[in-house]
Image (cartoon, coloured by chain):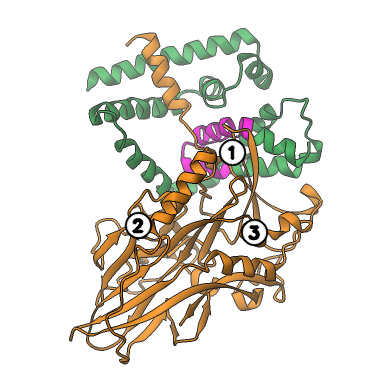
Amino acid sequence: MTNEKFEQILRRALAPDIDDHEIFVQYELSDETNGTVDNDTERTYIITNEKARSNCMKIIANIAAAAACVALVAGIGIGGKELLQHRTQAVEGSGASSVVSNVEKSTVWKLGEKEFAPGDSIPLTYDDYEKIIMLNEENGQGTYIITNSYPCGFELTPDIKNYNVKYAIAADFNCDGEGIESVTYSINKGAFAIITVEESDSPIKSGTLYDGEPHFTTDVKRHKTEKRDSANVIIRGLGGVPEYYTEYTVDYDSQRNGNICVDICGEVFDEDIYYKIYNNLKNSGVNDPVIKAEGLSDLMKDVEITCTVNYTDGTKESKKLTLEGVTMTSKELGRDSTDNNYDPDKVEATFAYKFN
Amino acid sequence: MNNKEFEHFAAQSGKDILRFCRMISGSSDGGDELYQDTMLTLLKKIKKLDTEQNVKSYAISVSVLLWKNKKKKYSVRDRIAATVSLEEYAESGEQFASHDDPEQIIMRKSETEMLVELTSKLPEKYRIPLYLYYSANMKIEDIAKYLHIPLGTVKTRLRKAKAILKERLEALEYDE
């Protein structure tokens, strides 16, 4: 081996490439660091686009401490922005399936384990998404499950350079009923990002893959967890990458076999929305949750999900879902009350599914 | 140092520091955690950081100190269960999606992985200068100042470390 070749291998081994997003620095706003008030539990990330020498302050809501933050920001120039917008527009309206009929049967629709009825608004809370353990008591070894790595069920990734907000929102829909063969979900904007447990039986029977590069969904992270004893929780990488659908159909009997996780993903380029969600950037560091909730609603205003039950007798029943921003207190959201910064009355913004 | 200056510092040196953290911790996850802890430590002292000084060297020394403190914790965790990150999986998939010949990719990865492992087994006096020079992208003069050893000693250690690695790598490849 020549010295030159060895030197090349050595550099590849000891100096591997690192993406810009990997150098995010996570810290909480505080008097100590920047003189602003740590008024909520949002965390601030600093990212710098090394190529463009442009610094961006990034704020990501409700991120799991254990999950690495992934955001697709760096290297996107004006041309990149146009390309992203073009791709987003390309999928708009492509995913929604027409609903053949709307036969009211006794199907109970659920988001996770929460039942809903038309008109209900169900917020995403910590209670639903932070409990990540499902024990198999019989063998005491714990059971592998896929879990949402966003503690409140969603993650936002802002890009101040392009006023772009990418979102990934848990979409754990399921239903109970008689004579159901399968359930079809479709989305009119963005995509469903679906991770399937490696070497497992997927409940997905068919689907329409997202027609385009899934640039906005690199944030999707789910984890398979194992609990070996009460004090020892181990989180493993799932070992899979998401697939992106605009429509997919799951088998009714195996819809809850725990082998898939689904997120709604997409992005919006809009300065007004950006500054509503991250209003603390224009508001002396103080985040107004009401303004933020408005921003979340604006972010999702064009997104509609259609859930269709396919009965064995050939009839169908559907529900339309939309998303909106809502405010709740920390207590209502189910935040960890043992946290030193816990204030049960503090108002925060979150997403809520609205069933029409 | 103010926030803007810190952002600039993170942009200029963040990758070097993260790379160094990953190398000394021996894993991507452990390195990422160490990097966050290192940068957080700096942030807590942001007002005391002087842009005129070598903040990167200071960051490296902080990461080494933190790593030594955490070494025991990481080893316990790894004994319980090794972690595989989704990012690593995705990255590997991305590599195979490239236009390179798959055989070349496998061969290159194999050599690279072998070298990472061989480096991790080197004595600390050889290993750390290698990490500082290649991973942290530090100049030999800065490494000498950081390790409080003469410039010539740094060069000797780097040369010796590379000679050991080359010999071992060639032996491994010959075996195969």
* Residues at discs 2 and 1 both on one chain: no
Where are the magenta residues, as a range?
B11-34
Q: Which residue is mark 1?
A: B67
Kindly indicate which chain is depicted in orange in the rendered structure. Answer: A
Residue at the spot x=31%, y=60% of the render? A196
**Could you tell me the amino acid type at mark 2?**
Tyr
Instruction: Residue A26: give x, y in percent of width and height.
Output: 63, 49
Q: Which corner quadrant of the image does residue A202 belong to?
A: bottom left
Observer able to see residue A114: yes
Report, in whole angstroms, how far the alpha carbon at label 2 lies from the one at label 3. 28 Å
Q: Residues within 10 Å of mark 2 (few under 14, many from 20)?
A: many
Q: Which residue is mark 2?
A: A244
Q: Chain of mark 3?
A: A
- Label disc, if present, on residue A272 of the rendered structure: 3
- Mark 2 in CB contact with mark 3 (< 8 angstroms): no
Residue A311 in the figure: left or right of residue A144 = left
